[in-house]
């Protein structure tokens, strides 16, 4: 059964750009209830606050999804390269998703809550009032690119990578923190006095519940201010980026302690928050990604390709804390800026629905057209913030179907480039675990298998980030054990490569030639 309820966007006052963007978005809560509740036992609620929507899942003691809800959220692009959201709207979207997902009858059975969240995005707010100071700056935002170049020219990139595990790049939170503080507390007086709070989305949402200013360690590791080896804020990085320690949250493990639920009707106040994870980390957890050899790709607005293991500084990859439940677990990861966003951008450009656009992808393929969607530069494994979008191979015979096919190939090639880098770090990858919204497209999954030359296993649950944080919360509530999670059936559709190896190599070489044209350095090879 599916219910749709219209609701007006509620956003923080004082940011007319985001208010306008929110009003242009169709404010629909989509809620779906299972036909049965799975018995009278305890339930776990998981909320995943993502870039384009907030999702909620209610899960029973067997791990089965009882109900779900989705609330869209808006973003604003006030200048080229700038991407903002309203922190107030994100909190309201969480409240509405919970209200749509959890019936009053089931609310009393919720044993605990888990939160997943978009990573790297950053919020500045007043400690006393809880009011945001300025907009949320999205992980997609590139306004700090010039400052990134300035720091790189001083030789700071080696320190940043060696301590934080990540390349010096505008995607991460540290440069956003510097920008926000320069804009709203240039002398750092309020920050040092403890009057302001800086935090990623998990920290912001937890602040709405009251209690201490905290951040989950996996999210903290994505700020580029944390020493990934020790799990503590690093004084050298704080000084480099101009961030006073007093403005930052306390780092806690993935299972807390966190403030309890407050103002999340119909949940009673006091329901414990049992787990918090970044969205990509949660998706890895849902794949039981602690098992050896598991490599996953999440296809969202951008993409995360991840494998567990502390293998040092792998070229082109990041090192971060995946989660800390019984101790910190490290991961290597490649982040791609535009995968699903490439397809939705084309849909917006042509004024059609994304689903209709995907159906137009030419059966014959892109016919020599290559599209490098370097919106805001290229992420892993290139880490080229100055790369520019390019389309090559256009002719007067090129039609929309070829462009759509080229966009899908761009998604598959970008993911494959990161998988190749992961192989160099961890060994051969024979099966790629896939999750996220774009995996609903069989065409996309077949392309991934063909262009990578490896099996793709598509998860039967598309909202895997939400399910992963539910798994972690249920683990904390002792509804199941880690062994039971590992043995839990995970239905998946398998896609086997059917493309000839010679054809695959030729198409990959043509893709890398297009990448070379996109990059100021003129390089297009991973070797």
Image: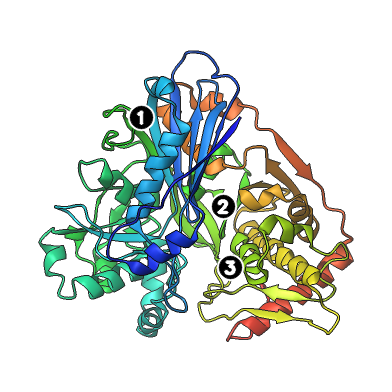
The answer to whether residue 137 is visible is: no
Residue 306: give its label.
2
Mark found first going from the N terminus, 3 or 1: 1
- Give the residue displayed 41% in from the left and 65% down from the top: 20
Circle 2 crowding by C-alpha within 10 Å: few under 14, some 14–19, many from 20: many
Residue 313: give its label.
none
Residue 451, image quadrant: bottom right
Lateral position of residue 193 relative to residue 105, left or right:
left
Question: In what element is the residue under mark 1?
Answer: loop
Mark found first going from the N terminus, 2 or 1: 1
Judge by depth and name the residue closer to the eye, 440 or 245.
440
Judge by depth and name the residue closer to the eye, 153 or 206.
206
Q: Which residue is mark 3?
A: 381
Q: CA distance from mark 3 to mark 2?
A: 12 Å
Q: CA distance from mark 3 to mark 1?
A: 44 Å
Q: Position of residue 296 (x, y in %)?
A: 61, 48
Q: Nearer the viewer, mark 3 or mark 1?
A: 1
Q: Which residue is mark 1?
A: 266
Circle 3 crowding by C-alpha within 10 Å: few under 14, some 14–19, many from 20: many
Q: Is residue 22 above or below residue 403?
A: above
Mark found first going from the N terminus, 3 or 2: 2
Q: CA distance from mark 2 to mark 1?
A: 36 Å
């Amino acid at each position: 059964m599916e219910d749709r309820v219209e609701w007006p966007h509620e956003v923080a006052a004082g940011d007319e750009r985001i208010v306008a963007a929110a009003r242009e978005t169709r404010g629909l809560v989509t809620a779906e209830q299972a036909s049965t509740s799975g018995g009278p036992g305890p339930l776990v609620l998981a909320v995943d606050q993502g870039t384009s929507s907030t999702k909620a899942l209610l899960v029973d003691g067997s791990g089965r999804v009882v109900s779900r809800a989705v609330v869209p959220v808006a973003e604003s692009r006030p200048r080229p390269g700038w991407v903002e959201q309203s922190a107030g709207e994100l909190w309201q979207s969480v409240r509405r998703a919970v209200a749509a997902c959890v019936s009053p009858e089931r609310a009393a059975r919720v044993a605990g809550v888990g939160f997943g969240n978009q990573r790297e995005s950053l919020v500045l707010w007043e400690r006393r009032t809880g009011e945001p100071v300025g907009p949320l700056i999205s992980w997609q935002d590139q306004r700090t690119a010039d400052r990134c170049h300035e720091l790189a020219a001083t030789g700071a990139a080696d320190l940043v990578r060696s301590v934080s595990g990540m390349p010096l790049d505008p995607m991460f939170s540290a440069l956003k923190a510097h920008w926000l503080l320069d804009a709203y507390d240039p002398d750092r007086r309020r920050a040092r006095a403890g009057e302001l709070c800086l935090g990623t989305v998990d920290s912001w949402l937890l602040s709405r519940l009251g209690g201490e200013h905290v951040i989950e360690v996996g999210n903290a590791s994505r700020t580029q201010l944390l020493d990934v080896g020790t799990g503590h804020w690093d004084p050298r990085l704080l000084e480099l980026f101009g961030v006073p320690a007093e403005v930052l949250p306390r780092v806690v493990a993935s299972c807390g302690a966190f403030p309890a639920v407050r103002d999340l009707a119909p949940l009673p106040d006091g329901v414990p928050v049992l787990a918090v994870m970044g969205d990509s980390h949660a998706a890895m957890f849902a794949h039981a990604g602690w098992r050896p050899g598991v490599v996953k790709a999440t296809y969202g607005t951008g993409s995360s390709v991840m494998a567990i293991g502390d293998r040092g500084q792998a070229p082109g990859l990041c090192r971060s804390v995946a989660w800390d439940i019984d101790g910190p677990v490290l991961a290597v990861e490649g982040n791609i800026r535009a995968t699903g966003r490439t397809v939705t951008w084309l849909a917006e450009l042509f004024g059609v629905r994304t689903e209709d656009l995907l159906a137009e992808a030419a059966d014959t393929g892109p016919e020599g057209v290559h599209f490098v969607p370097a919106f805001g530069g290229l992420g892993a494994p290139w880490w080229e913030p100055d790369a520019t979008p390019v389309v090559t191979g256009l002719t007067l015979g090129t039609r929309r179907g070829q462009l759509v096919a080229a966009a899908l190939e761009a998604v598959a090639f970008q993911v494959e480039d990161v998988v190749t880098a992961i192989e160099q770090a961890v060994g051969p990858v024979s099966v790629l675990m896939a999750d996220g919204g774009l995996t609903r497209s069989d065409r996309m999954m077949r392309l991934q298998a063909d262009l990578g030359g490896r099996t793709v296993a598509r998860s039967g649950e598309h909202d895997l980030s939400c399910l992963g944080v539910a798994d972690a919360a249920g683990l904390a509530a002792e509804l199941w054990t880690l062994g039971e999670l590992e043995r839990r059936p995970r239905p998946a559709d398998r896609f086997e490569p059917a493309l000839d190896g010679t054809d695959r190599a030729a198409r990959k070489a043509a893709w890398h030639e297009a990448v070379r044209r996109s990059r100021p350095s003129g390089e297009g090879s991973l070797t």
